[in-house]
Amino acid sequence: VDRELHPSFVEVVKQLSTDDAKMLKALHQRGPQILGDIRLRKKGQKGSKEIGRYLTLSLRAVDIERNIRSVYSLARLGVIDIASRYPTARSLRR
């Protein structure tokens, strides 16, 4: 089995913040997590209003907004997938 790393691996690692690296490690260790919006819908009215967001994985000493920003940052870098709102670690190998 060829264990060669993807050519852009070093560039991706350079772009990770400390929070991103901690989140990636936690996702790798704990597996898929649920990411979602908390929405409020008033009876008799169409549509809903977002009143918050949640992530089932919480890093100690990191607030929920920073956790969620890290998840989206990792997805933007192509390190994780957010499919059906379940972020999971992706392999950086070819």
Image: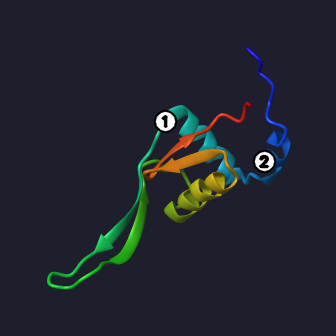
Q: Which mark is residue 6?
A: none
Image x and y of residue 2, in percent: 77, 18
Q: Position of residue 62 (x, y in %)?
A: 56, 57
Q: Quadrant of residue 61?
A: bottom right
Of residues 22 and 61, the one drawn nearer to the viewer in this rendering? 22
* Left or right: 33 in relation to 79: left
- According to the picture, the residue beneath numbered tag 2 turns out to be 12
Q: Is residue 76 above or below residue 53?
A: above
- Secondary structure beneath dot 1 equals loop
92 relative position to 84: left or right: right
Question: Residue shown at 59%/62% (left/top)?
Answer: 69
How many residues crowd around disc 1 within 10 Å: few (fewer than 14), some, or many (20 or more)? few
Residue at horizontal 53%, vertical 61%?
A: 63
Circle 2: residue type: Val
For mark 2, give the secondary structure: helix
**Figure quadrant of the C terminus:** top right
Total count of labels:
2
* In this picture, residue 47 sits left or right of residue 66: left
**Quadrant location, the N terminus:** top right
Mark pair 2, 1: CA separation: 21 Å
* Residue 59 visible to an observer of this rendering: no
Q: Is residue 56 visible?
A: yes
Label 2 with label 1: CB-CB less than 8 Å: no
- Disc 2 packing (10 Å; few <14; some 14–19; many ≥20): some
Q: Earlier in the sequence, mark 2 or mark 1?
A: 2
Of 32 and 7, which appears nearest the observer?
A: 7
Residue at 56% x, 47% y is 81
- Could you tell me which residue is drawn at 80 percent across and 40 percent down? 9
List x then y, in percent, for residue 46.
24, 83
Amino acid, disc 1 = Gly
Camera-nearest residue between 18 and 74: 74
Q: Which residue is mark 1?
A: 31
